[in-house]
Image (cartoon, rainbow, N blue to C red):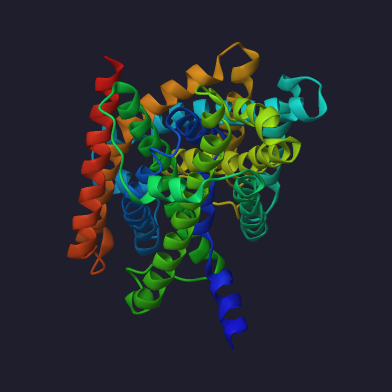
């Protein structure tokens, strides 16, 4: 019986698990490694702090998709002024292309470290592989591939067990908040929030809930409210699992950097690939290989999510078909956006754009977009015209607005730190 329940639980995981795992992309790994290298275990608590906010806002995104049967762009198009929609999609497009460039460059750099050769060729090659898989696999096959790729995140758990970790000190860093009144600490805090709560994840999870409904031939919940109870329970279980998994892995990445780089005086890491390289002399070849292979695995998971979230947003903005189950000729704009954003990101390295600098601007754009977009999502999820009788309850609304406020304050802190 227990085995059957475990199988049922694992089968119910999907959009939430994939979304959470995709949050630990190579650029995120670079951020968490830098935080661990610079502050040791001192900022680990921020990942626990932002977990409930991450859960609630992703749950809101999932509810919007499953209840309305439309993605976030389609709901903005339907209920709010067009300039809001255009600005949100444009900023998402810019941020994601830059983030794609940083992730693909990290994957290319790791491949170059492992086997030699040309980094640009590897970067373009990874981009092309991701595009072809996303275009030519149907949704069910592709969802299975993405679920399998989440296993690559266990590499970072293994790294921690491969090095000497002072568990008492590390766990104190997670459960006892430590604050330094410095601009560097504030920047690190904001960087973690911005990396953890990212707008592209909102668009992706909403769209994936719609894909799941289509796969099971179900109607949106506002049309079939009798299904709402068990379906909302599944969404919450899936989202909770995905976000907890994501943040636990993020904490392990901070631990790995703190236990190896920080204690050896290495305080500055600019990329995920640089973090992997720095591990080799202080933690050994095994830890280096685990960390490096994890970057490639997480990149293969995150790149399609980044490109796919833009494609859903762009196609919905123009009212065009947006589904991984559509044939390429039936959804030209959708698949064209996937190809264009992925390959544009892959080409950033070849035209001389510094991926570290690019990530900085990606964080700026995400900072501009996150809090306003979260505000719009909260308005949608509380709007009876969009959600019917399944509007978000009072407790969820309080948590959702709290998450929005925290992200707004973090954005203000980020821009204050620039000056």
Q: Residue at x 73, y 21 (%)?
A: 119
The foreground one among 81 and 130 is 130
Q: Is residue 321 visible?
A: no
**Quadrant for the C terminus in the image:** top left
Q: Residue at x 28, y 35 (%)?
A: 179
Q: Could you tell whether 306 is left or right of 188 in the image?
A: right
Q: How many marks?
A: 0
Q: Could you tell whether 114 is left or right of 154 in the image?
A: right
Expressed as whole percent of the image width and height from the top left, the position of residue 161 reads 63, 50
Q: Residue at x 45, y 27 (%)?
A: 38
The foreground one among 146 and 153 is 153
Expressed as whole percent of the image width and height from the top left, the position of residue 353 reads 56, 14
Identity of the residue furthest to the top in this view: 352
Expressed as whole percent of the image width and height from the top left, the position of residue 399 reads 23, 56
**Quadrant for the N terminus in the image:** bottom right
Residue 83 position (above or below residue 402): above
Residue 244 position (above or below residue 276): below
The foreground one among 184 and 199 is 184
- Residue 332, by quadrant, is top right
Identity of the residue furthest to the bottom in this view: 1
Q: Is residue 256 visible?
A: yes
Residue 213 position (above or below residue 93): below
Residue 395 position (above or below residue 165): below
Expressed as whole percent of the image width and height from the top left, the position of residue 160 reads 60, 46
Q: Residue at x 75, y 26 (%)?
A: 113
The foreground one among 413 and 158 is 158
């Amino acid at each position: 019986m227990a085995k059957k329940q475990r199988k049922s639980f694992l089968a119910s995981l999907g959009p939430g698990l994939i979304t959470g795992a995709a949050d630990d992309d190579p650029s995120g790994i670079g951020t968490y490694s830098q935080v661990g290298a610079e502050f040791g275990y001192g900022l680990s608590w921020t990942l626990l702090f932002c977990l409930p906010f991450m859960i609630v806002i992703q749950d809101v995104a999932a509810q919007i998709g499953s209840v309305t049967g439309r993605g976030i762009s389609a709901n903005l198009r339907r209920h709010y002024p067009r300039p809001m929609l255009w600005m949100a999609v444009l900023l998402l497009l810019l941020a994601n292309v830059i983030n794609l460039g940083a992730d693909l460059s990290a994957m290319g750099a790791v491949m170059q470290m492992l086997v030699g050769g040309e980094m640009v060729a590897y970067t373009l090659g990874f981009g092309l592989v991701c595009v072809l898989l996303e275009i030519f696999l149907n949704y069910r096959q592709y969802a299975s591939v993405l679920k399998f790729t989440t296993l690559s995140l266990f590499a970072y758990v293994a790294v921690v067990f491969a090095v000497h970790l002072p568990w008492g000190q590390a766990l104190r860093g997670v459960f006892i908040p430590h604050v330094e009144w410095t601009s560097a600490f504030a920047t690190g805090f904001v960087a973690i929030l911005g990396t953890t709560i990212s707008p592209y994840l909102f668009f992706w999870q909403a769209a994936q809930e719609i894909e799941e409904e289509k796969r099971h031939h179900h109607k949106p919940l506002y049309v079939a409210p009798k299904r709402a109870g068990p379906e909302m329970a599944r969404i919450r279980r899936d989202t909770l699992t995905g976000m907890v998994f994501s943040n636990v892995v993020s904490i392990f990445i901070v631990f790995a950097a703190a236990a190896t780089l920080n204690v050896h005086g290495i305080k500055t890491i600019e990329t995920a690939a640089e973090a992997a390289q720095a591990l080799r002399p202080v933690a050994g070849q095994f830890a280096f290989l685990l960390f490096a292979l994890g970057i490639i695995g997480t990149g293969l998971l995150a790149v399609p999510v980044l490109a796919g979230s833009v494609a859903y947003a762009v196609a919905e903005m123009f009212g065009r078909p947006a589904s991984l189950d559509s044939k390429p000729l039936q959804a030209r704009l959708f698949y064209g956006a996937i190809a264009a954003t992925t390959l544009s990101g892959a080409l950033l390295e070849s035209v001389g754009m510094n991926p570290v600098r690019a990530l900085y601007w990606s964080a700026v754009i995400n900072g501009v977009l996150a809090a306003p977009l979260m505000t719009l999502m909260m308005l949608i999820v509380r709007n009876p015209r969009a959600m019917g009788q399944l509007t978000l309850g009072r407790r969820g609304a309080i948590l959702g607005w709290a998450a929005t406020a925290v992200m707004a304050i973090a954005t203000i802190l980020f821009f204050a730190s620039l000056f």
